[in-house]
Image (tube, rainbow, N blue to C red):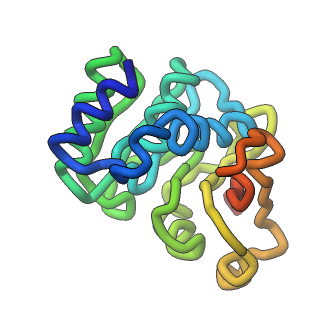
Amino acid sequence: MLEELYKEWNDKINVISRKDIDSLYEKHVLHSLAIAAICPFDDGARIVDIGTGGGFPGIPLAIFFPEVEFVLSDSIGKKIKVVQEVADAIGLKNVTAVHSRVEELKGRTFDYAVSRAVAPLNDLWRWVNNKIERGQKSDELPSGLICLKGGDLTQEINETGLKRIVQAWKVHDIFQEPFFEEKYVVYVPKL
């Protein structure tokens, strides 16, 4: 059902690369779920998805964690419309789609922030650091930023000034598909 919804919406509004739409489950859904493999969220956790685009990683994570609250934020209104329509069509009650840049969200705090291919790590951290509460809503990781990144991350991690606390896991160690060979889950704990 998810694939049909995204194909239908993608014909109206290009939210996923046309060359990737036929690989939706591998390149978007499974990739998003790498976060779940690293950090299974506790029921009641509050997650913000930074620059969710068409709903990734937020929608797959919300399906996987039905008792976790997800706020999917994006500055592009047509993408947020798709996110809301997809969430409504599949009956996701734990998703709130917000047409806003994450740094402009007022009066909201979260246990974790997630993202997928949105911006450099330094920018992501700057945008959400003050929106993440200290604590732990997972048996695996304390509160923080968890993002999906690709390629050589050495310079990007060094530029954060947080090199000593940033952790990275190879997605290929979780899912062996060739697509994931240069993909990582990167984590920055709340200080």
Left or right position of 173 against 95: right
Q: How many marks?
A: 0
Image location (x, y in percent) of residue 34: 67, 41
In the picture, which quadrant includes the N terminus? top left
Residue at horizontal 30%, vertical 34%? Answer: 7
- Looking at the picture, does residue 158 appear above or below residue 90? below
Residue at horizontal 61%, vertical 55%? Answer: 148
- Looking at the picture, does residue 58 appear above or below residue 163? above
Q: Quadrant of residue 35?
A: top right
Q: Quadrant of residue 41?
A: top right
Q: Quadrant of residue 174?
A: top right
Q: Residue furthest top?
A: 91
Q: Is residue 107 visible?
A: no
Residue at horizontal 71%, vertical 76%? Answer: 157
Image location (x, y in percent) of residue 59: 44, 33
- Looking at the picture, does residue 51 appear above or below residue 70? below
Q: Nearer the viewer, residue 112 or 60?
A: 60
Image location (x, y in percent) of residue 147: 60, 55
In the picture, which quadrant includes the C terminus? bottom right
Q: Is residue 89 visible?
A: yes
- Looking at the picture, does residue 181 appear above or below residue 64? below
Left or right position of 177 against 57: right
Residue at horizontal 55%, vertical 63%? Answer: 129
Image location (x, y in percent) of residue 8: 23, 31
Left or right position of 79 against 107: left
Q: Nearer the viewer, residue 152 or 169?
A: 152
